[in-house]
């Protein structure tokens, strides 16, 4: 049977895509299976059976799954390193020091805004959402816990800030990939994203300020915060050398060194500090494997600080493997290709093109769980359509990131959502309503398409002037 004969019909492609997704959502949201390994495995089986009906052999589908799983080798290596780094940064006093100064300097009512801004600055400087969440994010979870904030609120603010930088930083992989795929100069791409990202950031800040003002847990927690501060002072040196690992991370990441060597340096520097403070090599080896176990006088503080280690990340790796296997089947059987082709046929105007690009990116995310594919596939698929409509490619690259980069952590079975669950301990289903930036950016993307603001033609002329509010002659 030829490849064209095995191409699924639009109806069958929809069924093959929607039924497994519905199974995952049902098992995760309604049944409450956490972590959702079983729903994912059932989805893989159902997708495989439906693709066998098209004419694909099991060996071909298995080949697709293995190819997809092969793409997460770097993510798995990063996850393993992050698990060890968290334990090492606990042992070195780095995270306790960040928690200590966070509790001293951040007012509870402004905590969520502060968490958003801190993560935004860190990820903007380093270009990595993973690194930001795995280090500063973990410390902020501790600060939020001490202030009695709901973990989902805190993680929502952390995710919003971390992905602001992941999207806007000139040293971010996703930013550079989107610009390259759509053949747009890097800083032209970044300046175009200001139209959708800055208004969304303002909305996020206002949202976190309102959410923070609604929080009343800090009133009953002031005494416990003071106890935690006193216990931290008694249990850790809190010296300036504890801040060497995060400073090194920011400097080396900004110099665009590869992520794995940067993380190894962060790990080794923390281990050296821990040994300087009196930790033994055998104790550190055990902590890197099974996690750091705090032994302070405060049971509440021990809960905040006991985390990390290789074993803490194994469930996340299993989830990643299952999710990518599901996506690999849909790719191999051309299910996603059929869905994208159907969307392209009806997209002609600016509004329909931007809307179709957003939807396409979300379909790729739901189908594969891969941020990079959600940026690359629509960027390639819609390039000619934007060109035919005389819309500049910077609008395409921006839209790919508006959905692909920011939407990835919101899909419960995506690579990024599993990473967040493994490192910060909160699932996408729980933190999604509070990831204000990730939700707001696509809304502003659509608003720009509707109003014409921020839309540029291929000859570089704005469709609508910000000064006059009127359409230009280029429209």
Image: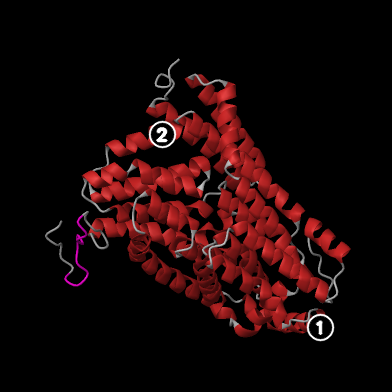
Residue designated by label 1:
234
**Residue 207: in magenta span:** no
Q: Position of residue 376 (x, y in %)?
A: 42, 46
In front here: 19 or 72? 72
Does label 2 or label 1 sit earlier along the sequence?
1
Give coordinates of residue 300: x percent, y percent: 77, 72
Q: Which mark is residue 117?
A: none
Q: Residues within 10 Å of mark 1 (few under 14, many from 20)?
A: few
> Are discs 2 and 1 less than 8 Å apart at CB?
no
Quadrant position of residue 37: top right
Who's the residue at 67% across and 59% down the image? 82
Query: Furthest residue to the left?
Result: 473
Residue 89 occupies quadrant: bottom right
Q: Residues within 10 Å of mark 2 (few under 14, many from 20)?
A: some
Find numbered disc 2 in the image and state the secondary structure of the residue it sits on: helix
Seen at 68% across and 83% down, the residue is 222
Quarter containing the C terminus? bottom left
Q: Nearer the viewer, residue 30 or 371?
A: 371
Q: Residue 337 shows which numbered tag? A: 2
Image quarter hosting the N terminus: top left
Q: Residue at x 77, y 73 (%)?
A: 273
Residue stretch rendered in magenta on the structure? 459-468
């Amino acid at each position: 049977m030829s490849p064209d004969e095995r191409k699924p019909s639009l109806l069958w492609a929809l069924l093959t895509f929607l039924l497994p997704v519905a199974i995952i959502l049902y098992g995760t949201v309604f049944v409450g299976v956490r972590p959702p390994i079983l729903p994912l495995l059932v989805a893989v089986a159902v997708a495989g059976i439906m693709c066998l009906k098209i004419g694909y052999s099991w060996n071909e589908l298995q080949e697709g799954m293995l190819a997809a799983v092969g793409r997460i080798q770097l993510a798995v290596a990063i996850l393993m390193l992050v698990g060890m780094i968290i334990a090492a940064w606990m042992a070195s006093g780095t995270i306790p020091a960040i928690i200590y100064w966070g509790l001293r300097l951040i007012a509870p009512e402004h905590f969520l805004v502060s968490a958003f801004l801190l993560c935004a600055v860190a990820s903007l400087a380093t270009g990595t959402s993973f690194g930001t969440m795995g280090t500063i994010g973990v410390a902020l979870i501790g600060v939020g816990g001490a202030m009695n904030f709901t973990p989902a609120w805190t993680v929502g603010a952390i995710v919003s800030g971390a992905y602001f930088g992941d999207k806007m930083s000139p040293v971010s992989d996703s930013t550079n990939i989107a610009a390259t795929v759509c053949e747009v100069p890097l800083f032209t791409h970044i300046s175009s994203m200001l139209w959708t990202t800055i208004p969304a950031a303002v909305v996020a800040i206002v949202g976190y300020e309102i959410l923070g003002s609604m929080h009343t847990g800090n009133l009953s927690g002031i005494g416990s915060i003071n106890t935690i501060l006193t216990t931290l002072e008694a249990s850790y040196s809190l010296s300036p050398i504890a801040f060497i690992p995060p400073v090194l991370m920011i400097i080396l990441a900004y110099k665009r060194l590869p992520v794995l060597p940067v993380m190894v340096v962060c790990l080794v520097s923390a281990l050296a500090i821990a040994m300087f403070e009196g930790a033994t090599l055998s104790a550190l080896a055990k902590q890197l494997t099974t996690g750091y176990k705090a032994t302070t006088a405060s049971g509440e503080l021990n809960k905040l600080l006991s985390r990390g280690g290789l074993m803490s990340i194994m469930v996340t790796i299993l989830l990643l493997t299952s999710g990518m296997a599901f996506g690999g089947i849909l790719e191999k059987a051309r299910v996603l290709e059929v869905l994208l082709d159907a969307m392209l046929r009806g997209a002609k105007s600016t509004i329909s093109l931007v809307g179709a690009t957003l939807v396409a990116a979300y379909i790729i995310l739901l189908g594969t769980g891969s941020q990079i594919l959600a940026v690359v596939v629509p960027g390639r698929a819609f390039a000619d359509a934007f060109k035919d409509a005389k819309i500049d490619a910077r609008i395409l690259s921006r839209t790919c990131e508006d959905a692909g980069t920011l939407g990835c952590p919101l899909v419960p079975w995506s690579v990024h959502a599993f990473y967040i669950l493994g490192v910060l301990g909160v699932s996408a289903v729980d933190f999604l309503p509070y990831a204000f930036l990730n939700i707001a950016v696509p809304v502003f993307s659509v608003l720009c398409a509707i109003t014409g603001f921020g839309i540029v033609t291929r000859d570089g002329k704005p469709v609508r002037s910000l000064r006059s509010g009127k359409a230009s002659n280029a429209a």
